[in-house]
Amino acid sequence: MNEPIVARHWLVIVAPKAAPAIATTTVLALARIWNANGAEHSVGNAALMTVLSAGAAAAGVAAGNSTGDSVLAGTAFAASGALAFAGVAGYADGLPLPLLLWSLATAGAYALAARYWRTDRRDTVAYQRHVSDRREEYAHIERVETLHATTQIEVARTGAAYAEQLAAALVTRATLPGFDPTALETAGLPQLPATERKFV
């Protein structure tokens, strides 16, 4: 019930939200480095990136059709888009087109990631609600058991106190001057237990 409160570092919270922008920016930077090292207007390099991009897209279609795994298909299509983006950014001879593609790729990456974030948040909320319900249920059972145990202890305590008071009363009565248990018996009162006669 008393779980430790864990405060996550702000980088742990921000990193997943920044991952799509970091990924597309990294691809843009590497493509521009590749552009500066001979990829600009290189038909061979552009053809290579086109083939790789088409292969990744075909792998995504095949994965989606055969296994139905949306994560695998999404990863393949993301790789296809990244390769196409890198090919265009490496082939182009200026920054306007690569920056335009970077902004579109970043927006698309955030649109896809938002879907998974919503699903993850929904699953997390459902799990927390389930855990909270279970905790409430067990807390109720624990409270009932505590009340039951406390009641039993109080009953036992009351019985012990009554026994002590009865014993003290018997001892006190036996020590009174002029106390005669036989006189009580002849008067028609109930007979005292044999243990009481030892006090006379």
Image: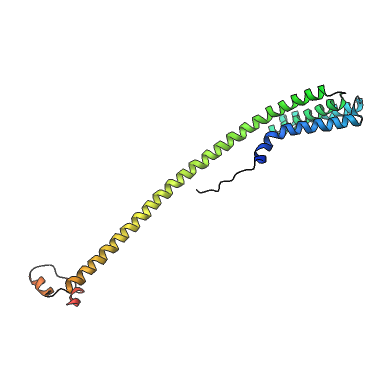
Image quadrant containing the C terminus: bottom left
User: In screen coordinates, is 92 left or right of 81?
Assistant: right
Residue 164 in view in this figure: yes
On screen, residue 20 versus residue 96, left or right, reads: left
In the depicted structure, whether residue 75 falls above or below residue 188: above
| Residue 12 as seen in the image, left or right of residue 133 | right
Which quarter of the picture shows residue 190? bottom left
In the image, 100 versus 53, the foreground residue is 100
| Residue 106 placement (x, y as % from top left) | 73, 28
Quarter residue 180 falls in? bottom left
Q: Nearer the viewer, residue 9 or 158?
A: 9
Picture quadrant where residue 78 is located: top right
Is 111 above or below relative to 130?
A: above
**Picture residue at 56% right of the left edge, 36% below the top:** 125
Q: How is the image coloured?
A: rainbow
Rendering coords of residue 83 (x, y %):
81, 29
The residue under the point 61% across, 31% down is 118
Residue drawn where x is 45% and y is 47% of the image: 139
The answer to whether residue 194 is above or below residue 44 is: below
